[in-house]
Image (tube, helix red, strand yellow):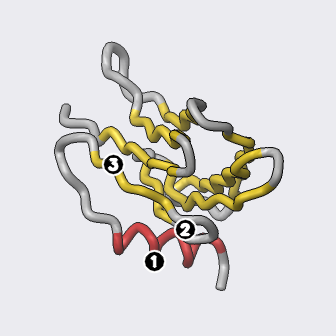
Amino acid sequence: MTFKNIAVAALALLTLGSVAAADDLKPMHSRSIDLGTMTGIAYYTVEPDGYHVVATLAQNDAGEAVRFETVLVSGQTMTLSTPRGAGMPPVKVEISRTADQIRVLEAVATN
């Protein structure tokens, strides 16, 4: 199965709202990400040096994917975003760690 097929399937499971939606993420369980023009998945693993977060994204109409990796310790946040039109806020997803919990906050644009 290609990344594009996985991303499309994950996107089909994603429910869209008009406000920010937050979900807890469990180790080795993926969650879909929707940044408007890009979609993908994020997951993390627990390692001795911190929680290794991986986000893989691709443009909706192209098969090329980009992968972001970071190590989060408690109190840190990773932000992924895509720009919109002039004067409009970006579409963004924040992945934060507090203690032993990873939370994904997806701000859904209302404009």
> What residue is at 68 percent from the left and 54 percent from the top?
54
Find residue 75 and name its label: none
Do the residues bearing badges 1 and 3 touch, measured as CB atoms within 8 Å? no
Do the residues bearing badges 2 and 3 touch, measured as CB atoms within 8 Å? no
Label 1 crowd bin: few (<14), some (14–19), many (20+), radius 10 Å: few
- Compared to 28, does 20 lie above or below? above
Q: Amino acid at mark 1?
A: Ala
Query: How many marks are shown on the rendered structure?
Result: 3
Q: Amino acid at mark 3?
A: Ala
For the residues labelled 2 and 3, the Cα–Cα distance comes to: 14 Å
Query: Is residue 103 rendered to the left or right of residue 107?
Result: right
Label 2 crowd bin: few (<14), some (14–19), many (20+), radius 10 Å: some
For the residues labelled 1 and 3, the Cα–Cα distance comes to: 20 Å
Q: In x, y percent, where is residue 30?
A: 55, 68
The residue beneath circle 2 is: 30
Quick one: SS at disc 1?
helix
The residue beneath circle 1 is: 9
Q: Amino acid at mark 2?
A: Ser
Q: Quadrant of residue 57?
A: bottom right
Query: Is residue 22 rendered to the left or right of residue 53?
Result: left
